[in-house]
Image (cartoon, helix red, strand yellow):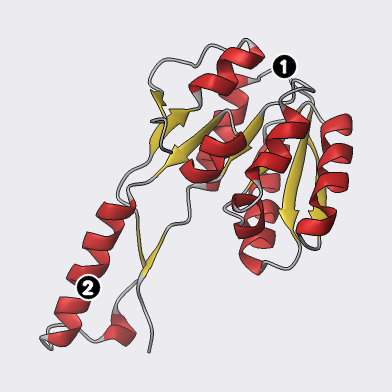
Amino acid sequence: NISGTSDLAPLDQQAAMIQEWFPDAKTVGLLYCSGEPNSQYQVDTVQEHLEELGYTCTQYPFSDSNDLSSVCQQAATESDVLYVPTDNTVANNTGVVDNICRPAKIPVFAGEQGICAGCGVATLSISYYDLGVTTGKMAVKVLKGEADISQMPIEYAPQFTPMYNAEICKDLGLTPPEGYTAIEADG
């Protein structure tokens, strides 16, 4: 008897985004916290899509923020590109990832805008405001008796905006493909 909304980005499109930016890359490191089942799901799914595109993927799980630095260092050393899903531990430690990857010239693609603002090159971003409006409309239907929550499908963000981190792109000498919007300085 549950339903709601999800901020899950289209993982196939995120894999395609990596290919759009780095078609000649060979290896993608997938950095995530092993204590977050949502991150494991995203990494497993995006890995399938990346491998279909011809990339070799290696998962780099870390157990908590204490071992993020050493695992990130290994991932940056062994990968052409890194992908980070919508992972709460990374979101709270983007400075650690950025301090390792930017000097090493390893681009990081992020599952959401906040992580991208802290350490990423690009992401597909959703409007959390629009997602909140969708959630509110669902709640109104349930409260008015117009819908049975057990019969309501989970709804996803209506659209995703390709975004890039201008500062990191400049530091890495990257020009975003057409159609990308710069992330505002406040993230």
Is any part of residue 128 visible from this angle? yes
- The CA distance from mark 1 to mark 2 is 44 Å
| Left or right of residue 73, residue 144 in this image | left
Residue sitting at x 69%, y 47%:
48
Residue sitting at x 74%, y 44%:
30
Marks 1 and 2, the one that precedes in the sequence = 1
User: Which quadrant is home to the C terminus?
Assistant: top left
Q: Nearer the viewer, residue 135 or 156?
A: 135
Q: Which residue is mark 2?
A: 138
User: Which quadrant is home to the N terminus?
Assistant: bottom left
Q: Secondary structure at mark 2?
A: helix
x then y, percent, for residue 140:
15, 77
As displayed, is residue 88 above or below residue 106? below
How many marks on residues? 2
Quarter location, residue 163:
top left
Q: Nearer the viewer, residue 169 or 153?
A: 169
Quarter location, residue 76:
top right
| Left or right of residue 166, residue 155 in this image | left
Residue sitting at x 72%, y 16%:
24
| Left or right of residue 52, residue 161 in this image | left
Residue kind at label 1, given as amino acid type = Asp
x then y, percent, for residue 154:
37, 69
Q: Nearer the viewer, residue 170 or 27?
A: 170
Residue kind at label 2, given as amino acid type = Met
Is any part of residue 55 visible from this angle? no
Q: How many residues crowd mark 2 within 10 Å: few (<14), some (14–19), many (20+)?
A: many
Q: Which residue is mark 1?
A: 24
x then y, percent, for residue 172:
65, 15
